Amino acid sequence: MNHYRYLAAALAALATPAAAQSLTSTETAQIDTLVTGALAKTGTPSASIAIVRGGRIVLAKAYGRASDAIPVAQPDLPYQIASISKQFTAAAILLLEDEGKLSLNDTVSKYVPDISGGDTITIRQLLSHTAGLQDYWPQDYSFAAMAKPTSPQGIVDIWGKKPLDFAPGSQWQYSNTGYVVAGLIVEKVAGEPLLAFLQSRIFKPLGMTPIDQDLAVGAKYPVGYQRFALGPVRVEQPAASGWLFAAGELSMTASDLAKWDVARMNRSLLPADDWTAQETPVKLADGTTNGYGLGVSAATVAGRKLVTHDGEAVGFLSQNTVYPEEKAAIVVLTNADFGDAYTSIAAGIAKIVLPAAPVDAAETAKTAQAHALFDQFAAGTLDRGLLTADANYYFTPIALSDYHASLGALGAPKGFEPLRGPRLRGGFVNRNYKVTYADRTLNIVTYAEPGDTGKYEQFLVMPAN
């Protein structure tokens, strides 16, 4: 279950008075067209969305078919939000720390025995995916064991006792296992079930009514759907109970999640330093970070801050992104575990309801540079001086011939634009681009040396949906 996906197009709104934040009829119509089009194109049965602008919820609406029993989706239906739940588990830990009952720097062995590396792994490392515990669910489907019920301890007994994938704090690797352990710590310290703690300390005060996703099954709830390649859309068999727990156990409406987003913007309910702790990227031992904090990712895109996380359950995909400085948020919940409807809807809504981000001259120049190199590949006129030694090794005569033949045949593209902001990895700057033609779209994944004249380490072109 891979959950580390940044919002492809993250744009933010300029702060304006709340009275000016209501959606216009034109904006609402554009959103309706966007969502229904995305559902039709991908085969996703339904979507439930919520939009916060000016610090208040300005739209909560559902589209499509929630199930055969619910042919018209309604905004009061709870959808499984999966890993978006992690930020609530992290919040529970922070609240217990506020009460002096634990510390983020405590080791796991103080609360949960027999965990591999438990005497060196800290709670902070559990919440930031830097503990080294092997993820029990890296797959994007239910594996065989998930047909039978389990328990948090059952998960820990298998995956929590395997050798660590790396020394705690030395690497980042998404781990649902770490959050299961964190949930067990909450229950031991709080003396009550995790969900009961969250209900009393977070959900009830905010007027939220989430339920355990294991209980959100049956005729009253949205059904999850799957698709094999481009085959028919089929009902997905839910996993047996107990497989998500603190790693992704919640089902809620888009409006409920938006209420939580508003609390984040306003620094209400939790102490302000708890919100800050969640949103502060955790650094590895070598001083680097990928932007993940405690249950959320934090990034700055085109000069605008955002806090985001997505979720993937059996038959469900979701995206939640907050623009805290602009008092804006976009929630998209879908009942399909295939396609990109949830991210494309979120990105499309951002373009409709939030002003375009200010132009970043440096990034505009980098996009033009990448476009020019793309044109060289297509024309068969590559200047190898623009590439590093490794990139020149990769681009053999065969590779260059294939690039020239396949890209040159497409003619001039209609569009060439970045998919998101730059980020560091392995000493290089990663930038991704989308190239559009009349009948197809390409994605480009690049790595380049830092600086205005940095050479390209990678320039991979691939087909896109």
Image (tube, rainbow, N blue to C red):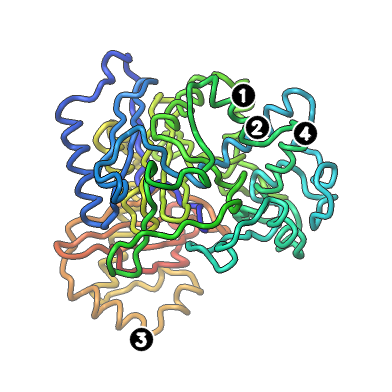
Residue highlighted by disc 2: 92
In the rendered structure, which amino acid carries the disc numbered 3?
Ile
Q: Quick check: marks 1 and 2 in contact, CB under 8 Å?
A: yes
Residue highlighted by disc 1: 201
Tag 1 secondary structure: helix
Numbered circle sitting on residue 189: 4
The residue that appears at 70% across and 43% down in the rendered structure is: 182
| Gap in angstroms between the C-alphas marked 4 and 1 | 14 Å
Tag 2 secondary structure: helix
In the rendered structure, which amino acid carries the disc numbered 4?
Val
Q: Position of residue 420 (x, y in %)?
A: 39, 48
For label 3, count other residues whose C-alpha is less than 10 Å away and answer few (under 14), some (14-19) or many (20+).
few
Mark count: 4
In the rendered structure, which amino acid carries the disc numbered 2?
Ala
Residue highlighted by disc 3: 398
Among the two numbered marks 1 and 2 on one chain, the one whose residue lies closer to the N terminus: 2
Q: Position of residue 387 (x, y in %)?
A: 43, 69
